[in-house]
Image: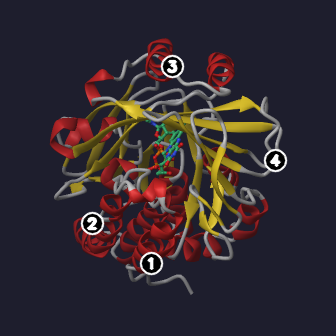
Amino acid sequence: MKDILISGASIAGPALAWWLHHHGFAPTLVEKAPAPRPGGHAIDIRGAALDVVRAMGIEDAIRDRRTQMKGVSKLDADGNEVWRSEEMTISGGSFGKQAIEIMRDDLSRILLSALPDDIEIIYGDSVVSLDEAEAGVAVSFEKSPARRFDLVVGADGLGSAMRKLVFGPDERFLHPFDVVLAPYSAPNIIGLEDWQLTYDSGTDSCMIYTAPGNRDLRVCFGFSAKLGDVPADRAGQMALVRRECGHMGWHVPELLDAMEQSRDFYMGPMAQVRMDRWTRSRIALVGDAAYCPSPLTGQGTSLAIVGAYALAWELSRSPDDHAAAFARYEERMRPFVSRNQAIAELTRDPRFSEDPGYYVEVIEPAMEAAEYAVELEGLG
Ligand SMILES: Cc1cc2nc3c(=O)[nH]c(=O)nc-3n(C[C@H](O)[C@H](O)[C@H](O)COP(=O)(O)OP(=O)(O)OC[C@H]3O[C@@H](n4cnc5c(N)ncnc54)[C@H](O)[C@@H]3O)c2cc1C
């Protein structure tokens, strides 16, 4: 058993490909986007995930690209500062911790660059059907000719097409929090320097912060919406942001204008994926596709990296018995996933955005307890 197809090349996909290759498998990545996808907010690598990137030899490259923010201010509807902290940011937590905050696209680029040249990456394509047989899986693609693989892994994110194809419709597994997030990059039109802002209009809010170097801002609007209310097309999604957030004052009108020009606008529901099993027959899911904890936990990327490691490790322990490897992967990851998904309940508390003390006294200890709640073998 050698050839493994991985659908999705953001975080979980390339991390899994790296570790599978390391253990002597031949992974192939297929990514729907025509090239590595730009965009995404600051994400965090914590706890066991740090041990994994260290073992891959990419920790320094990641630290070199980490965000450089020196603090956060909360602004009221008129743009006046209500409170500030120079000890933490909302997105990255308290300073002085081991955790690394980095932009999603920077991390994805570093993971993709770390892949050996003989790993095939097919961009601009996706799996349309799987036909499982005794000896493997016959895979049909939207564009490429059909091929056979020994195993197939879905690392295709929250809206995973692989999950729908193999396990069933979203309604069974997606638990939405009825909030939609719309992050994008904009030129630094407000002259912010190494800083984060949360702007609260009274009814809605947005978060704004500098990308490393201060040339660009990352802006993220968040508002109430049901899963079914999110249009599939970019123009419809931007129109929804304008409809929901157009009433906001301060610099929001300029930031909304910049959204129209943004090359990396992204819209995603705030939701968790909860499944009883992440594997079936010759197919497995990893990362957000399997167990997205939602941005409310700040742990999606760490779960994806650790999950990728654990899956590759278990396959390496029994390369000719994928069923046993899948069972061990489920067993190893289940408590880690449950513990990290539970953080969402704590961050949904209104005190999370109102009281910096709540973050330090309640959220941070819970995260610290969860980030190492998995036993990883073989990391040296
Ligand atoms: C553009 C983008 C912006 C994001 N912004 C944020 C953010 O601001 N805040 C946050 O907390 N999280 C964000 N995320 C999610 C975050 O990256 C994940 O929570 C986490 O890092 C786990 O990564 P993942 O690889 O499991 O999933 P993802 O990072 O979601 O990656 C899934 C990958 O699969 C690809 N894909 C999707 N469908 C198919 C298909 N049918 N065939 C092939 N490939 C497919 C996608 O293009 C993507 O590259 C974003 C993800 C993306 C793709």
**Position of residue 238 in the picture relative to residue 165 (left or right):** right
Q: Which of marks 2 and 4 is nearer the N terminus?
A: 4
Q: Report the quarter where the C terminus lies.
A: bottom right
Q: Earlier in the sequence, mark 4 or mark 1?
A: 4
Residue ID for mark 3: 247
Here the colouring is secondary structure
Element assignment for label 2: helix
| Res. 131 in view | no
Residue ID for mark 1: 365
Q: In this view, does 3 lie above or below 239?
A: below
Nearer the observer: mark 2 or 4; the answer is 4
Task: Name the residue type under label 2.
Answer: Phe
Is the CB of the residue bearing disc 3 within 8 angstroms of ligand 1? Answer: no
Element assignment for label 4: loop
Give the x, y percent position of residue 353: 47, 53
Give the x, y percent position of residue 320: 31, 69
Task: Name the residue type under label 3.
Answer: His
**Label at residue 326:** 2
The answer to whether the residue labelled 1 contacts the one labelled 2, judged by CB atoms less than 8 Å apart, is no
Q: Report the quarter where the N terminus lies.
A: bottom left
Nearer the observer: mark 1 or 2; the answer is 1
**Label at residue 193:** 4
